[in-house]
Amino acid sequence: MYDLSKTSMNVTLAVKQYVSKMIETSGSGMKVLLMDRETTSVVSVVYSQSEILQKEVYLFERIESQNREPMKHLKALCFLRPTKENVELLVQELRKPKYSVYFIFFSNVISKSEIKALAEADEQEVVAEVQEFYGDFIAVNPHLFSLNLTGVSRGRSWEPSMLQRCTQGLTAVLLSLKKCPMIRYQLSSDLSKRLAESVKQIITKEYELFDFRKTEVPPLLLILDRSDDTITPLLNQWTYQAMVHELLGLNNNRIDLSRVPGVNKDLKEVVLSADNDEFYANNLYLNFGEIGTNIKNLMEDFQKKRPKGQQKLESISDMKAFVETYPQFKKMSGTVSKHVTVVGELSRLVSERVLMEVSEVEQELACQGDHSNASQMVRRMLQNPRVSELDAVRLVMLYALRYERHTNTILPALKGELERRGTSEHLKQMVSRVVDFGGKRVRGSDLITANDAVAITKQFFKGLKGVENVYTQHQPLLHDTLDQLIKGRLKDSQFPYLGPSSLRDRPQDIIVFVIGGATYEEALTVYNLNRTSPGVRIVLGAATYTIQGVTSHNAVIRS
């Protein structure tokens, strides 16, 4: 369960409070919530439709929708990004208002000239309020946010519009958390330095907005580049939230299960939200075996209340059969049938794609240094027809990164295996691109060290019958970076401060932003550090939607 005592560094709570304030500001009466594509995602991740309905918001509309009916009995709450397009759409709206009164909330700083344009359009004087509420990011978890951007750079240079959008998103997070931080950035990355300077520029320009009560130890913003650790996004994960995202696709808390064989029509799309689903909140960081055990325990409790006709719950398929047999259990337990379906599909995919075996080889490549053994293991997996195209390419990418300069490299032979498998040209190119993007020449850190095998102990988890033990040896580079930062040992020579000042004390409130995307494995690292480091509160954010897998590198790597 989340520790909500650390509320001053909780991005979910920050966005929820903004939405609540919007609704309160408009007073009682029936309301319509008018949003754009991006703010719709911002709100839907932190509030369910039923929750907002209870606050007298009865209609949800998009500002760009041309066929909205006039409804003069409704108040309009407008929550929009301050883009030129949205301001123009609002100008048109105010000239011919469809609702009785307008409360306008922008998700970031809006210019005086745009405010003037809105005032001139408001000839009927329907605007009651214009405010800035800084919910300009997706709050994935309380300690994890994303800007939902792809293609932020061209090679090692920023896409100009993306630099501006990342700056806006990052400054919105700082304003929503009420933090005016000192800034450190990754020296080996020009992208990191440019973003650090851009954020600093906004803090200086909007100094009145950032005039928060001083804390004994100033907050810290640390800007990193994905290219420093390209291994973490390539590893299969075994915690619930990460597996759901990787294998089923988790988009703004929604999962599309319509392709699941024999799925109930009520479960073709499901929502997984830690705020509204206690089972998910308690299990999202647990491993696959533990989740199965927890569902099993819940069902066994129900069975105890029904002494007749008990059936064994030994495997995930037993559980699915149980839910179908006892519809009243489904009704009584609410979310459990949803999780049985999700876990059942994860289990099917793990088996179908031999992911336990794939993961073992991934961990060998990421954490061990035995080239001969690794070469044999990768070759064997590439020759297995059950290994998917993505997993095969991912293994070769890991090999290319791990043994980039090894004298006995078998990379040409592995590329030949991909050719024989009929791998698409686009995916084959990813192997060389990942080395260009995050190889030894580019990295500023010691991602791969000689003593990995000694430093990392093998951990096993045991679980439900039908779920084999798997390795989870790997720790992302972010763990070491944050550990050094918390202990006051992070080298200024690698992560300099922007400007002349530096922290004398160990940091307490830390916002980490990864250009090019963060992973759920890194989110788990931050979650654990928050739990085990007294007085330290960390929030992790990324430009690209939180990633794990080859698809992540499609978004990040540019030729």
Image: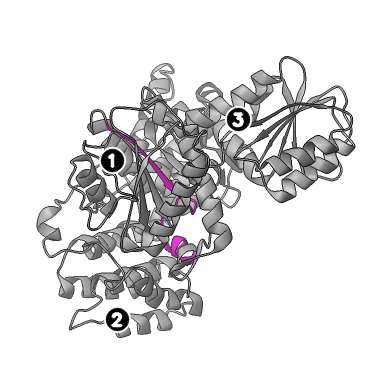
Asked whether, in this view, residue 337 is left or right of residue 120, the answer is left
Residue type pointed to by label 1:
Gly
Residue drawn 48% across the image and 28% down it: 13
- For the residues labelled 2 and 3, the Cα–Cα distance comes to 49 Å
Whether residue 550 appears in magenta in the rendering, the answer is yes
From the image, tell me which residue sits under label 2: 411
Instruction: Residue 548: name its quadrant.
Output: bottom left
Asked whether, in this view, residue 89 is left or right of residue 246, the answer is right
- For the residues labelled 3 and 1, the Cα–Cα distance comes to 32 Å
Which percent across, then down, holds residue 329? 51, 24
Q: Secondary structure at mark 1?
A: loop
From the image, tell me which residue sits under label 3: 48
Does residue 281 appear in this view?
yes
Q: Of marks 2 and 3, which one's residue comes earlier in the chain?
A: 3
Residue drawn 54% across the image and 64% down it: 159
User: Residue 240 or 427: which is nearer the viewer?
Assistant: 427
